[in-house]
């Protein structure tokens, strides 16, 4: 086995960033001024997400020219994504969160760092200093009038630069955000849109009347007084904790080994006589099953006489529903089209079951997400206020492909989320080199836990990988 975790490097603590200019970018042509409907999936995701895209120096595109190109491309793209230059508002009459398409603009900032990209070091490893590469709010605007998107271009002394983007998750999911980046890159190169966006969120509206046709143990109902703004659930607030964090690196060879272990559990033929004939052995499924087991067992201290073995654990992970609906959503659907599915097992089962059985549980969770089940979840959100709730959430940025977007100045050296450490959330994201000679790709697993639990997680990670 290869080295499976990376000791924290000593990242530079201060990138010495100076913001030179902030402004607003408006659509270069008028867009309709009207309320913009948000689906029940969108409204649960009313929180900001930041991504950072690092680029090496390019002779033809120094950072100042990149900033000019991006600013012009943003003005063009806002015509195609008319909601993006609007503002979130809570409609007290309908009791719904919506976007007012008032063309009040997106934010744009130009900054410079006194460091080079070599000074920054390992771009894969989360660095608190990366916050300096993102503008999260515009000081020139009131708190209730902030843009849904802010772009910051930060130049480094080596000629490289970072594009940091802060955006409200209600606007995009990972796949539609990649399409947005592809379109932004195309317009920056004076090319046609790569994908025509479909902005019709009514495609994921609840049925009338709502029909909650399945139990939904993955969803937690909140008691919110009628008419009260519940558009920012407290579940997304960070709780201060003293956490260690590590990145566990799984190489293509490691992942192939896990897949081989799981396939053996399913029987060599995978036929009807095998113990787990339904198991779908994919990279995501085996990695998720592996870290679910390690995470849950790392919190068992053994001092309860074994009673914790009967306690149930709920694993949550996202499933794209675009192709699962009848009819499928348009290819360019520009909103949130992912729902959280789940797998459940007791701690005793997670300890005793072979990997193939756990992979089957993860597979069944994704298979549960049919058209009818997805519609039931959406309808649940129409009659209830709540959110997905479980013990472990696996958030995967592994294969979203942000680093594959081709800009006029080349592809990003690396693309990553701005990471906030939460013990209940495990992040999967790609390595700097995403492909290998055998056609596989590795993954980085970011884990944040209290120190004693981290030591146990690390031991279990080795144990179950062997």
Image: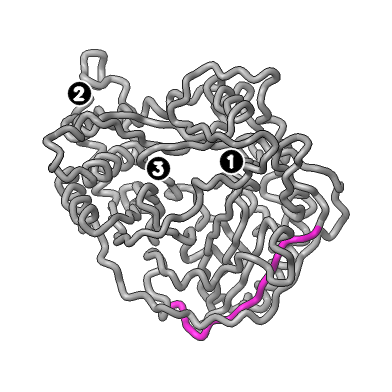
Q: Percent position (x, y) of residue 344?
A: 33, 29
**Magenta span of residues:** 104-117
How is the model colour-coded?
A: one colour
Q: Secondary structure at mark 2?
A: loop
The residue tagged 1 is 44
Q: Quadrant of the C terminus?
A: top left
- For the point 41% across and 81% down, the residue is 119
User: First in sequence: mark 1 or mark 2?
Assistant: 1
Q: Percent position (x, y) of residue 416?
A: 47, 59
Q: Percent position (x, y) of residue 166?
A: 60, 60
- For the point 51% across and 86% down, the residue is 114
Observer-nearest residue: 346 or 25? Answer: 346
3D distance between C-alphas at marks 3 and 2: 29 Å
The residue tagged 2 is 267
Residue 410 bears which disc, if any? none
The residue tagged 3 is 393
Q: Quadrant of residue 392?
A: top left
Q: Secondary structure at mark 1?
A: helix
Within 10 angstroms of label 2, few (less than 14), some, or many (20 or more) residues? some
- For the point 80% across and 59% down, the residue is 104
Q: Percent position (x, y) of residue 388?
A: 48, 36
3D distance between C-alphas at marks 1 and 3: 16 Å
Residue sitting farthest toward the front: 225
Would you say residue 190 is visible in this rendering? no
Within 10 angstroms of label 1, few (less than 14), some, or many (20 or more) residues? many
Label 1 with label 2: CB-CB less than 8 Å: no
Observer-nearest residue: 302 or 181? Answer: 302
Label 1 with label 3: CB-CB less than 8 Å: no
Would you say residue 86 is visible in this rendering? yes
User: First in sequence: mark 1 or mark 3?
Assistant: 1
């Amino acid at each position: 086995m290869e080295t499976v975790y990376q000791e924290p490097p000593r990242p530079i603590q201060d990138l010495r960033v100076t913001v030179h200019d902030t402004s607003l970018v408006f659509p270069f042509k008028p867009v309709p001024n009207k309320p913009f409907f948000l689906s029940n999936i969108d409204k649960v995701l009313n929180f900001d997400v930041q991504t950072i895209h690092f680029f090496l120096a390019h002779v033809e595109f120094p950072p100042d020219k990149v900033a000019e190109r991006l600013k012009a491309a943003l003005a063009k793209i806002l015509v195609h994504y008319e909601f993006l230059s609007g503002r979130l508002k809570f409609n007290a009459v309908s009791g719904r969160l919506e976007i007012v398409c008032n063309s009040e603009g997106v934010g744009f900032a130009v900054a410079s760092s006194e460091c080079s990209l070599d000074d920054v070091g390992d771009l894969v490893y989360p660095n608190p200093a990366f916050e300096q590469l993102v503008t999260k709010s515009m000081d020139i605007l009131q708190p209730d009038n902030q843009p849904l998107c802010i772009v910051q271009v930060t130049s480094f002394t080596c000629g490289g630069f970072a594009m940091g983007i802060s955006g409200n998750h209600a606007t995009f999911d990972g796949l539609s955000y990649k399409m947005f980046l592809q379109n932004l890159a195309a317009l920056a190169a004076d090319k046609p849109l790569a994908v025509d966006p479909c902005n019709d969120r009514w495609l994921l509206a609840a049925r009338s009347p709502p029909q909650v046709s399945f139990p939904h143990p993955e969803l937690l109902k909140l008691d919110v007084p009628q008419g009260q703004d519940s558009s920012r659930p407290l579940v997304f607030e960070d709780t201060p904790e003293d956490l260690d964090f590590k990145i566990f690196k799984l190489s293509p060879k490691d992942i192939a080994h896990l897949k081989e272990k799981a396939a053996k559990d399913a029987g060599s033929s995978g036929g009807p006589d095998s113990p787990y004939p339904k198991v779908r052995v994919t990279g995501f499924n085996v990695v998720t099953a592996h870290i679910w087991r390690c995470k849950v067992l790392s919190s068992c201290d053994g001092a309860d006489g074994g009673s914790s073995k009967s306690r149930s654990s709920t694993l949550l992970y996202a499933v794209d529903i675009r192709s699962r609906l009848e009819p499928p959503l348009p290819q360019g659907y520009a909103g949130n089209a992912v729902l959280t599915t789940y797998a459940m097992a007791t701690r005793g089962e997670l300890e005793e079951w072979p990997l193939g059985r756990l992979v089957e549980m993860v597979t069944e969770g994704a298979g549960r997400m049919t058209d009818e089940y997805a519609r039931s979840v959406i309808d649940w959100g129409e009659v209830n206020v709540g959110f997905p709730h479980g013990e472990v959430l696996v958030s995967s940025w592994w294969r979203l492909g942000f680093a594959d977007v081709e800009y006029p100045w080349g592809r990003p050296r690396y693309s990553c989320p701005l990471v906030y450490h939460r013990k209940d959330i495990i992040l999967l994201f790609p390595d700097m080199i995403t492909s290998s000679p055998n056609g596989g790709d590795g993954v980085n697993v970011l884990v944040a836990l209290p120190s004693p639990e981290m030591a146990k997680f690390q031991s279990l990670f080795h144990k179950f990988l062997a």
